[in-house]
Image: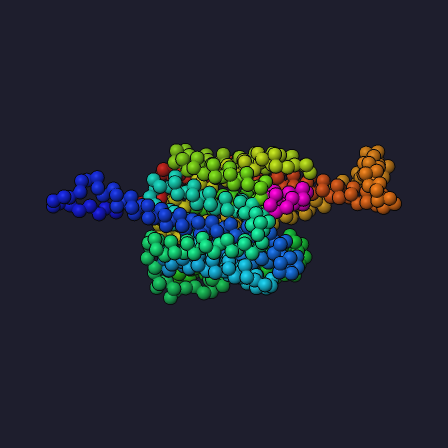
Amino acid sequence: MSTTTAVRGGPGAPSPAAPAAPVAGVEGRRMFAFIAMVFGMFMAILDIQIVSASLSEIQAGLSASADEISWVQTAYLIAEVVMIPLSGFLSRALSTRWLFAASCAGFTVMSFMCATATSIEQMIVYRALQGFIGGGMIPTVFAAAYSVFPREKQPVVAPIIGLVATLAPTIGPTIGGYLTELFSWHWLFLINIVPGIFVTIAVVALVDFDEPNLALLDRFDWAGLAFMAGFLGSLEYVLEEGTRKDWFEDAGITFFAVVSALSAIGFFWRAFTAREPVVDLKAFGNRNFATGSAFSFAMGIGLYGLTYLYPVYLARVRDYSALMIGETMFVSGLAMFVTAPIAGRLSAKIDPRLMIAIGFLGFGLGTWKASAITVDWDFWELLWPQILRGVSLMLCMVPITNVSLGTMPPAALKNASGLFNVTRNLGGAVGLAIINTVISNRTDLHLERLSESVVWGREPVDEMLATITAGLSSLGSDASTAALAQLKQIVQGQATVMAFADVFVLLTVLFVVLSFAAPLMRRPSQPGGGGGGH
C-alpha cells in the first residue's frame, strides 16, 4: 500500500523518514479491522461444532424427538451453504463493511433468539436464520485477506485465516462440552452476544476497504438465487440426512435429490446466461483456483470427517461425556496453533505444492496409525493421530488458500472466495455422508462375520461366557441371560471398531492419492501465492 502524507517544503518540514508513521498507522488500523472480522468468522464456524457436542442436552431442554433435534444442525448448514456463494455478489453491492456488519449483527441477534427458544420449531427457524445471515462473514474475510493486504503480508495473513477456519471446528466440541457442563446449553448461544456486538461496532468504525455499488441490486438474479437455494440446500439435506434415512429408500431423500438435480441445471444455466449472475463461475477457468478448490473439497473431508470420527468413537465405544471428548480432542487444536506461524513462514520460502503434498501425506500417516484402533484406545493412543491431523491441516490450508485466492485478480476475489469456501463445506458434507454409510455397512458386515465365529461349542467362546457368567453370579438365575447380553455387546463393539478402522484405511488411500496430485497446480510467480495484484 502506498499511502503517503508527508508535507513537503517550508520551515520545520519533516525528514524523509517521517511518512513511515502514517503508513504504519493505516496498516495498523486495517490489521485491527481485519482481526475483528476474523473473530466474527471464528464465531460463525465455531457455532456448527459447539452445538453438535450438546445436542442431547438441547433435545431434553426442548422436549424434542431424535428426528427433530437433528434439524438444529441441518437447518444451520443448509442456510449457510446457500449464503456463502451468494456473499460475493452482496459484498460487491453493499461493500465489505456493510455486508459484514449486517451479517455479524444478525448472527448475534439470532444467537440470542436461539438461547430464548422454548420449542424445537422456534429453534429450527432461529438456527436457519443464524446460519444464513452469519454465513456471509466467512468468505468475506478470505476475500479481504487477499484484496486488502499486499503480497509481502501474505505469510502473516494467510496463517491467521487458515488457523481460524480449521481450529474453530476442531475445538468446538471442547468449548461446547465445557459450557454445557458448567452452565447450560443456552450458553452455547449466549457466548456469542458480547463478542458479536464488539465485532459489529469495530467493523462499522474501522473497515473501509471498498465502496458499495448499489446499482448491482437492480440487476439481482432472483431466479438464479432460487435455483442455487434449491440446488445447494437440497444437496446439503440429502447428504446430511441420507445415511440416517437409508438414502433413496426414503421418499423425502429421493424427492430432494431430484429437486437438487433439476435446480442444478437451472443454476448453471442462469450462471452462464444472466447479465449479473448471483455466482460468477468464471473463476474455475483459472487452473490454480480450480485445482485448489478440489483440494479444498478434499480438505473438508479431513477437517470435518475426522472432527466427527473421533468424538463418535469416544462416545459410542468409550462412553465418554461431551466434556471428556472435548478434552481429548484439544490436542489437534493445540497442534494447529503451534504450526500456523511455521506454515506461514514456509509458504514464503518453499514451493507451495511441496507443502500441500507433505500435508496430505501427514494426513495419510495419521489415519494409517488410527487404522490400528481397538476398543481400548484412549487419549494416549489417539495422541499422535491427532497431532498429525493438526499439523497437516495447517500445512495444507495455508498454501492451498494462497495459491487458489492469492493469484486471482482483485475484481474476481469476492466471488472466488465464496466458491472456495463452499467447496470446503460441501467436501465436509460429502465426507460425512460417505463415512456414515461406510461405518453402517461395514459394521453390519463385521457383525455378521463375528457372529459366525461366536457360537456354542467353540472353546474360547464357552470360556468367555463362563467367565462373564461367574462375574454376574450375584444376579442368580438371571446371570446366564445377562452374560449373553454382555457378550453380544462386546461383539457389537468389536464390529463397530473394525468399521472405524476400515474408514481410516479408506481415508489413508484418499490422502496419499491427493499428495501425488499436488503437481497439478502451477507454481505461482512467488512462493506462497501473492496478493491480489498489489
Q: How does the figure colour the protein chain or chains?
A: rainbow
Which quadrant would residue 16 be assigned to in this image?
top left
Left/right placement of residue 135 relative to residue 442 reads left
- Image coords of residue 81 (percent x, y): 51, 55
User: Looking at this view, is 309 or 288 the one in front?
Assistant: 309
- Image coords of residue 89 (percent x, y): 41, 58
Q: Across the whole image, how many numbered discs are drawn on residues?
A: 0
| Residue 411 visible in the shown view | yes
| Residue 352 visible in the shown view | no
Residue at horizontal 61%, vertical 37%?
379
Main SS of the magenta segment? helix
- Image coords of residue 88 (percent x, y): 41, 55
Left/right placement of residue 256 relative to residue 31 reads right
Residue at horizontal 45%, vertical 54%?
194
Residue at horizontal 69%, vertical 38%?
375
Q: Quadrant of the N terminus?
A: top left
- Residue 375 drawn in magenta: no
Left/right placement of residue 450 relative to residue 477 reads left
Going by the picture, which residue comes out furthest to the left?
Answer: 11
The correct choice, above or below, for 425 with respect to 487 in the image is: below
User: Looking at this view, is 33 or 527 the one in front?
Assistant: 33
Which quadrant would residue 272 be assigned to in this image?
bottom left
Going by the picture, which residue comes out furthest to the front?
Answer: 182
- Residue 311 drawn in magenta: yes
Residues drawn in magenta: 310-325
- Image coords of residue 35 (percent x, y): 40, 47
Q: Quadrant of the C terminus?
A: top left
Residue at horizontal 48%, vertical 60%?
109
The correct choice, above or below, for 378 with respect to 296 in the image is: above
